[in-house]
Image (cartoon, rainbow, N blue to C red):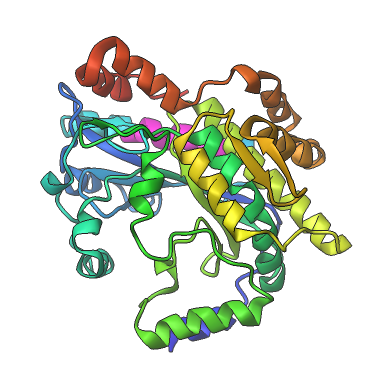
Amino acid sequence: MSEIIQLDKNIFNHNELYTLGVEEEYMLCDKYTGELVSKANEFMKYLNEDEKRRFSYELILSEIESNTSVCRNVKEAINEIKFLRNRTKEICKKIGCKMGISGTHPTSLPQNQDFVDTDGYNWVASQLQYYARRNNTFALHVHVAVEDAETSIHVANGLRRWLPPLLAISSNSPFFMGEKTGMKSSRTMQFSAFPRTHIPDKFENYEDYKRIVRTYLDLGTIEQTRQIWWKIRPHFDYGTIEFRVCDIQRSLRMTEVLVGICQALVYQSVQDYKAGILKENLDLEFLNDGLWKASRFDLGSKVYDTGDCVIKTQYDMIKTMFEYSKYALEKLGNIHIYKFIKKIDNFNTEADLQIRKYEESGFNGLKLFLINSVEFN
């Protein structure tokens, strides 16, 4: 009953709209070999009471999640991410490990990882069994505040159009369990083994959304609303829209691009919704095809733009996304992020950089690269 009451609670009572919250998931690695190490319990002991709000466990003990406070703009969010990364580095040094960043760990075996012992994560482990154990994945999540529940539903409908290009520019997980997977984002494939991790279908309105969630609760499919892990979701704890599609980035510059473009996409989509021109009726088959190609192929692959109803390359889809966001980027003080599209034709994702490093120095060199090339400032 508490979860149903929560769905009806007015948590969209923000002092400012389009504020941001950013979550990053970090690997805890052996400082000599780069393999995952189960040190999350030790890590948490070094946090003061204020810091405990900024860091949390994830499913496995070789992973730590950082969470920014509510940030008024992208600059503030990136500055806080810098602080959290540096604090993570400091604590890792004290407990004899290093933080690493990649969408998946390239070689550490899932069966060697230890689960976090909490009711929530024990439920996940019990439900998903073998596939929970395989979830050595690390993501970037971006929250953007919106004004009310109804707006959040319609805007999330429209934002589904941009999930494939967001994944395409953020892919950072070409290796898993010591294999070159052939994917650019094997994290997407691994996490997609979980239920309720897909691109959601269109919701007609907020009541339609509540019907789905309440039925899931009645069925025992979920125990909490946060056990719905769609690629994009209205978040009814925070009053936000949450993007859950991106691999985590070592580069702070790319993190800034992703956070900024997510905020701008929400802003522009809200304006379109209010004007009655937001494109919500998007073909889910082609959205899924675009997401698959973003996780598998380079940016020259052909995709179907479900908004304009034309075939484009992934490159052109990314350009369309930035053009759509240009006014919002300027309005929000982030027009410098728009300049990213000038480099897109020669852009290398962090997945491309991982593959290059592997070809140069094998897995041993790659693992050291993932712990030694993290940007902190």
Q: Residue furthest left?
A: 112
Q: Is residue 208 above or below residue 352?
A: below
Q: Residue furthest top?
A: 360
> How far from the left and from the top, in percent, is residue 48?
31, 48
State the extent of the magenta-drawn residues as a range: 76-88
Locate residue 197 relative to residue 337 in the image: left or right. left
How many callouts does the rendering have? 0
Q: Is residue 148 above or below residue 94?
A: below
Q: Is residue 235 above or below residue 338?
A: below
> How far from the left and from the top, in percent, is residue 280?
72, 62
Q: In percent of the image, x 64 and y 39: which residue is there?
A: 260
Q: Nearer the viewer, residue 226 or 186?
A: 186
Q: Quadrant of residue 76?
A: top right
Locate residue 214 relative to residue 362 in the image: left or right. right
Quadrant (top left, top right, bottom left, bottom right) of the N terminus: bottom left
Residue 65 forms part of the magenta stretch: no
Q: In percent of the image, x 66 and y 68: which residue is there?
A: 153
> How far from the left and from the top, in percent, is residue 236?
54, 70
Q: Quadrant of residue 66?
A: top left
Q: In percent of the image, x 60 and y 65: which residue is there?
A: 239
Q: Is residue 233 in view from this perspective?
A: yes
Question: Majority secondary structure of the magenta segment?
Answer: helix
